[in-house]
Image (spheres, helix red, strand yellow):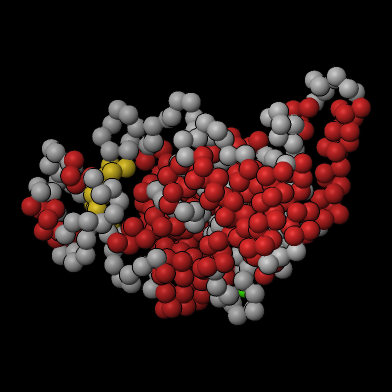
Amino acid sequence: MVLSALLMLTLMLPLSAQGVPLEDHGKKKLNSAELKRKAAPAKSKAARAKRKSGATKVKTSLINTKGSQAAHYNKRPAAMEAANTIAAAQQLDAVWVRKVIGQAQYLPAVVRAVTPPAQPSSRNWATYRERVLTVQRIEAGAAFLHEHSATLARAERQYGVPPSIVAGILGVETIYGRNMGQFRVLDALATLAFDFPDSHPKKAQRQAYFLGELEAFFHFCHSSGYDPLTVRGSYAGAMGMGQFMPSSWLQYAVDFDDSGRIDLFTSVPDAIGSVAHYLSVHQWQRGMPTHYLLAANALPADLGALLEPDIVPSFTAQQLEARGVVLDATARRHTGLLALVALPMGESAAPHYVLGTDNFFTITRYNWSSQYALAVIELARAIDAAAQNRP
Ligand SMILES: [Ca+2]
């Protein structure tokens, strides 16, 4: 989903868009008149509630879910101040930015998505893997590989990233563009920028991050001609087939079909080129394996120092051997650094361990999660295998 490392550490949601119902795409094309019609019922409910003074029980939860938080941000001085700051920083019309942010709606579902659970469930790679590596996702991936083979091959020539890895990312993120998120990006980013949940231990950092993304979103809409009131994406504001955050779209998205415009919503070539470009910029190395498997008895009893750098490749093959790790012949020949990556298997089982290379680490730049990276890699392999077996 191309979120910052800091953010992903906290979101800790297994899949960027998986918790979100499907069926979005068409909705992002709603024009402002349609949106106004959609918004009208809520407005009249608000008006009715207002008229019935004292009748606060009348469906106010639909309008005003958290005391002082208005459903729309036009009544929030902090939001209007932020609009002025964004306009000044991006040299945009302040009246326009205020008007747009004023129409942003507080979304309780977005707050729920980033609220740490009262009782954190233990992460489980097996469960995660099962959710990602579905027959449907693998078969659709093989079809995607087949249909877009020329574009994927061109992306590999240019950026060095194998077709199946690009397909694996698009598959995990949005099922190859089928599930790009149903939230209005404006609403999602405003909610996270102005109403990040107090219960979150890193609220201030996250809120600042999303405020930055809201600013990037205005830059993006202004420079690309998208209507900020209609663009849709994930609960975190990630957009398009590869779920790029606004700042990532601005920095890393490419026009890979030479249409003169970057469109990650409808141009598969743009999505393919942009994912490959993103990985390339984040140091994907052509031809390097992503990871090596470890035998069940390959690890020493004391893993403390080996796990300390987490997913950052920090040890040579020789250093790992000196610390008691048993490597297979291919891992022993690896010339770069390796990380001992632990994937939790729930509370009662021992973790699943692999040795991640620099390319494994690069995939985690897309989404800060070792589960995510291994899921992308395993999906890529399954897609490759399914593609070979296609008639
Ligand atoms: Ca294009």
Q: Is residue 270 above or below residue 218?
A: below
Q: Position of residue 130 (x, y in %)?
A: 43, 42
Q: Is residue 240 above or below residue 156?
A: above
Q: Quadrant of residue 225?
A: bottom right
Indicate left or right for 349 with 178 as reference: left
Indicate left or right for 352 with 187 as reference: left
Residue in the foreground of this view, choosing between 190 and 289: 190
Most distant residue in the right direction: 51
Asked if one can make out residue 52 in the rendered structure from this viewpoint, the answer is yes
Q: Position of residue 191 (x, y in %)?
A: 64, 43
Indicate left or right for 33 with 357 as reference: right
Asked if one can make out residue 239 in the rendered structure from this viewpoint, the answer is no
**Residue depicted at 82% across the width and 44% down the height:** 39
**How many numbered tags mark residues here?**
0
Q: Is residue 354 above or below residue 282?
A: above
**Residue depicted at 72% across the width and 49% down the height:** 80
Residue in the foreground of this view, choosing between 338 and 74: 74
Residue in the foreground of this view, choosing between 273 and 215: 215
Q: Is residue 340 above or below residue 335?
A: above
Q: Position of residue 203 (x, y in %)?
A: 51, 39
**Residue depicted at 10% across the width and 49% down the height:** 323
Q: Quadrant of ligand 1?
A: bottom right
Q: Quadrant of residue 327?
A: bottom left
**Residue depicted at 74% across the width and 36% down the height:** 70
Q: Position of residue 325 (x, y in %)?
A: 13, 49
Most distant residue in the left direction: 322
